[in-house]
Image (cartoon, rainbow, N blue to C red):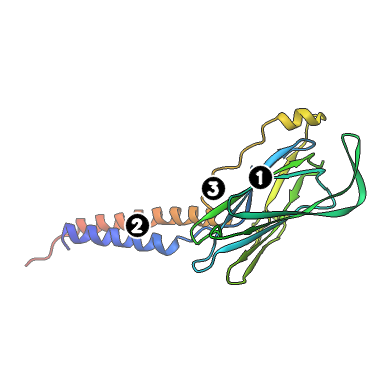
Amino acid sequence: MSLLKRSAVVAGMVAAFTLALAVPASAHVTVNPNTAVQGGYTKVTFRVPNETDNANTVKVEVNLPIDTPFASVSLKPVAGWSMVAEKAKLAKPIDAHGTQINEAVAKITWTATGDAAIKPGQFQEFDVSLGPLPEVPRVVFKALQTYSDGTVVRWIDEPTTDGTEPEKPAPVLTLTAGSGDAHAAASAPAKAAPAETEGDGNGTWAGLVAIALGLVALVLALLAYRRAGAAPAKAE
């Protein structure tokens, strides 16, 4: 076998093996940043990617926990989207700067108007200001994503105890203990989430495994190439 042919075989083996192992990362609704300080205020961004090839995302609903409510919820307008914040009565009133709060925002709904829907291969971000943040380890925002074909994807699965990512994970905001001063906590910068490529969790691990196995395939192919090169040529 000529040197050119052997090189082509090696390249083909590596490419085929790597492509066979490459698993597309799973994109889902996330909250960014994903950490904040208990007792303070923060601005979070709900990032919503379109996961289909033939439908647009036309509505996004995010549920806020009513058992650990936010006294203050403010929405940033998004061009081409209407927004509604629905309140619910609290079982137990909460105190906010000396004022008794008997109801709090329980759900936020964004609905696309005109041509603003999230199209295939695109994503949209929705900003919300929240506070004071409850003294709990985390806040789970269960979200529903509605497509133009009527499909509703329910991002409502809570984090698992074994650390594996659920099939439809809900956006999670991790809260760290504050200094006890709500204003100081509010001014402290929240830890930014890593830059996203619209996928993480199982998709990231699958990608790392694919890369590692691809390198193994490359080493094996190179060894085969060296053996083929070392073999004596047959007499013509």
Mark earlier in primary sequence (1, 3)? 1
Front one among 206 and 191? 191
Front one among 122 and 17? 122
Q: Residue at 58% of width from left, 54% of height from top?
A: 80
Please name the amino acid that badge 1 sits on: Lys
Q: Residue at 13% of width from left, 62% of height from top?
A: 233
Q: Residue at 61% of width from left, 59% of height from top?
A: 112
Q: Is residue 95 above or below residue 236?
A: above
Please name the amino acid that badge 2 sits on: Leu
Secondary structure beneath dot 2 equals helix
**Which of the numbered marks, if any, corresponds to residue 76?**
1
Question: The N terminus is located in which quarter?
Answer: bottom left
Secondary structure beneath dot 1 equals loop
Q: Is residue 175 above or below residue 189?
A: below
Question: The C terminus is located in which quarter?
Answer: bottom left
Front one among 39 and 106? 106
Front one among 61 and 15? 61
Q: Kindly tell me whether residue 50 is visible in this rendering.
A: yes
Q: Which residue is mark 3?
A: 196
